Image (spheres, rainbow, N blue to C red):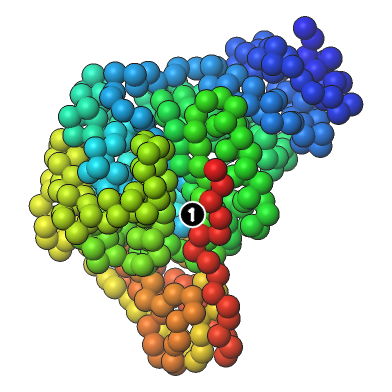
Amino acid sequence: MRMYDLIAKKQAGFELSKEEINYFIEGYTKGTIPDYQVSALLMAIYFKKMNERETADLTMAMVNSGDVLDLSMIEGVKVDKHSTGGVGDTTTLVLTPMVAALGIPVAKMSGRGLGHTGGTIDKLETFKGFSVEMSKEKFIEDVNNIKIAVVGQTADLVPADKKLYALRDVTSTVENISLIASSIMSKKIASGADAIVLDVKVGDGAFMKSYEDAKNLGEAMVSIGDNVGRRTIAVISDMDQPLGLAVGNALEVKEAIETLKGNGPKDLFELCLTLGSNMVMLANESLTEAKAREMLLETITSGAAIAKLKEFIAAQGGDVSCIDDINLLPKAQHIIEVKSDKEGYVSKIHAQEIGVVAMKLGAGRETKESVIDLAVGVVLNKKRNDYVEVGDTLAYIHANSLELGSKLKEELASCYEISKEYEEKIPLIYDIIK
Ligand code: URA
Ligand code: CA
């Protein structure tokens, strides 16, 4: 087989066989096929696209390029959840104890990554002493005993994706549905998921800016799942404003604890119930959606979910006293009010820019070496469609430097658009693709 022929074939618009796809992924991972030939093939795929069969074959070729986590020692259906990324997305912290409280195993491998706020691991490290370093044996034992554990990314998962993503990034070939879908799905499958619930975000603060694009991506990932025997559901949800109120690490942990105690923001809780009921239905196919929701709600009213959070944090060495007393969480030295100079309805909150403000305060990483300040971030006081008067507080900046926090006031205020007219509500959940 010659790489030249594969490039020419795709360039002419033909399908690549499974063997051809395996050949190029194996060769690229090993380093026997050079970047320039893979770049050319990526560009041909970008223009001529891949069909569902090719996309599924590409996904499995990528899965097999590295280690695959064997979770067969864990009893039950391992359902994983993945978000395509948003601003202030606290769902994992809320959702996983709820699902685990129902006896459904949550075996999560997480990374840190770059972003406006830290990743799930950074947020969990808000609990003093919490550690994601553990042996595979302890990980499996914890999931079997308490139904939930989060481990750091140690295995060499999907090395083909690391190389391909970096190459796509510099060759303007990121934006292809098959390449995005296979990249995301290969990582979930390699980390041991039997079934997957995807939260595909759409809007200003998301990777997918339009509903059409988000729907196409959701459909492509569900189709991969069907083709490779991992049942997959994609929920298309709004990211045209931050989810919940908090954007920042300890601030989101506080929001998650409050939500698990039944006092969380409505949109965050509703999305958790939607994603959660789909996870429950994938784990137990005999349940209806209404029943799954009822069971999840019961984990909140009975206190089972917050008890599960405590059990999980304690099992990984974390201090759980802040769960009973949220005043013990890390706090920023300064809380600065950002006020409205207009009257009217909030018509838009630029989620992406809110994330940037949180990052500038120190909540996220700009480079791999950045050190996160767990205490800082932004807390919204008004959300879309709320009515505000001149002088009303739009949001709060939590800063450890008064100078920096004050400097960002204007930038945060300009994230809000205020209009005289009440605009039509944007739905929280657009669609569920099964
Ligand atoms: N996220 C991923 O993991 N891969 C992509 O290709 C795009 C977004
Ligand atoms: Ca939030």
The answer to which quarter of the image holds residue 282 is: top left
Which quadrant is the C terminus positioned in?
Answer: top right
Task: Give the image location of residue 404, x and y in percent.
Answer: 39, 68
In the image: residue 83, left or right of residue 1? left
In the image: residue 45, left or right of residue 206? right
In the rendered view, tell whether residue 82 sits above or below residue 8.
below
213 or 85, nearer to the observer: 213
- Please name the residue that numbered disc 1 is placed on: 86
In the image: residue 305, left or right of residue 413? left
Task: Give the image location of residue 350, x and y in percent.
Answer: 54, 68
Residue at the image position 16 percent from the left and 55 percent from the top? 302
Which quadrant is the N terminus positioned in?
Answer: top right
Density class for disc 1 (Cα within 10 Å; few <14, some 14-19, many ≥20) is many
Q: Residue furthest right?
A: 12
In the rendered view, tell whether residue 315 sits above or below residue 267.
above
396 or 199, nearer to the observer: 199
Residue at the image position 55 percent from the left and 32 percent from the top? 225
In the rendered view, tell whether residue 191 sits above or below residue 236.
above
Q: Residue furthest top?
A: 1
Task: Give the image location of residue 176, x and y in percent.
Answer: 70, 40
In the image: residue 350, left or right of residue 57? left
In the rendered view, tell whether residue 305 sits above or below residue 191.
below
On the question of residue 52 being in view, the answer is: yes
Q: How many labels sit on residues?
A: 1
220 or 384, nearer to the observer: 220
Instruction: Identify the amino acid type marked 1.
Output: Gly
